[in-house]
Amino acid sequence: MLIEIHMMQNHAPSNLNRDDTGSPKDCVFGGVRRSRISSQCLKRSIRRSPIFDEELGHELANRTRGLPDLVKERVLAMGLSPEQAAICAQKASGFGNKEGKEPKDGRTAQMMFLSPSDVTAVAEVLHAAAVKAGSPKAFEAVSAKDVQREAVLRGWRPITPDIALFGRMITSDAFRDVEAAMQVAHAISTHKMDHEFDYFTAVDDLLDPSEAEDEKGAGMIGDVEFNSACYYKYFSLDVDALIENLAGPRPDARKASTADVQLYEANRQNAAALARRAVRAFLQAAVFTSPSGKQNSFAAHQLPDGILVEVREWNIPVSFANAFVKPVTAGAQSDLVERSLTQFKGHVEQITNKFALSSVARFWFTTHTVTVDGVETCETLPDLIGRLAEVLEGRMAHG
């Protein structure tokens, strides 16, 4: 089962996602320059949002190089001495690479997306290694590379909804890679983009009026680049993959005991319930969260004007970005947002009819009067979220 989310969201002047020069990110689409927000930026703003945290907080992971500090805290609580705990932390720094090299700065070589169960597993293995070694000197001689090969680390263990949604790749034997269940497109403007510059000055508040004339001007000057854009956003979620990521591998029926099969089925039911919560949390966070770039300067906190959610039986994703190959322009009788919604509506109807795209359910929410043929219109966002929840629960109840 596939869930696709399409959004049109108009932002006031802003610099939500900038490149290495400080300029808002952009791209060429349909032969013209568009404003762009990278998928990485969108994913981070969603998974770190207060809404996502409130819905799933105690079950979320962290992307960090700080595994050594987390391990040190755990092994101290498990009864190791401060000296042994410090060695554990140093060994944990070698878990960021296959060679087990321990960086001198006491942090892992790579940023890793780690669940609480990952940290616990590493702490337990290092605690056992410290106890087995006996003396701190003997423990120091233990190779981090060898510790990473412990079977308990290489096996499956539960992951969090954010890892299950967005996936991870780690070059360490201690952690398994996870194929993302969620695909996120770069958001692009529905129209041609023009960069603008804000020239700003700052004046010294404590400047003495009696000082020299050349000291009475600005204390500093600068400029920041910005634009204003109506974005098309697209998200595609493989619900079955999400549940599989959360439930873990299905046991081999030829080798597994009845108890193993029953345990897996129970895990899968729990995973399905958690997946439904994750979908709700993701949709809410995607609607109410904007990237944080330069928000103290621009406060571009606008909500979407159109949301289309489609539930499909088969995992055949379809983006409607081509609705905006011809860039939208504002007219005398309609603004940029309304023109974007109307152009989107026409493209959705055309593609759906031409390709006979089938759906289990389709829901449309908008702040305007634009409707999409063959789609159930929801008057409020809670209505849309509630209807989607009903469909998911019904589909999952029937396998």
Image (spheres, rainbow, N blue to C red):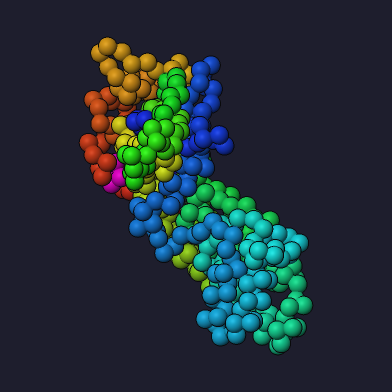
Q: 392 or 326, which lies in front?
A: 326
Place residue 366 in its image quadrant: top left
Give above or below for 148 relative to 111. Answer: below
Give above or below for 74 relative to 344. Answer: below
Q: Position of residue 85 (x, y in %)?
A: 61, 79
Is residue 361 visible from the viewing direction of this image? no
For residue 40, side relative to residue 101 (left or right): left
Q: Position of residue 342 (x, y in %)?
A: 33, 20
Q: Position of residue 329 (x, y in %)?
A: 37, 15
The outermost residue toward the bottom is 134
Find the magenta span and give its range: 384-388
Q: 183 or 26, which lies in front?
A: 26
Marker count (numbered): 0
The outermost residue toward the top is 332
Q: Where is residue 337 in the image (x, y as percent from the top left)?
A: 32, 24
For residue 166, side relative to residue 233 (left or right): right
Report the residue at 40% width, 48% height from top. 282
Residue 23 counted in the magenta span: no
Report the residue at 60% width, 85% height from top. 81
Q: Is the magenta stretch mostly helix, strand or loop?
A: helix
Report the residue at 63% width, 63% height from top. 107
Q: 313 or 340, which lies in front?
A: 340
Report the residue at 30% width, 22% height from top. 338
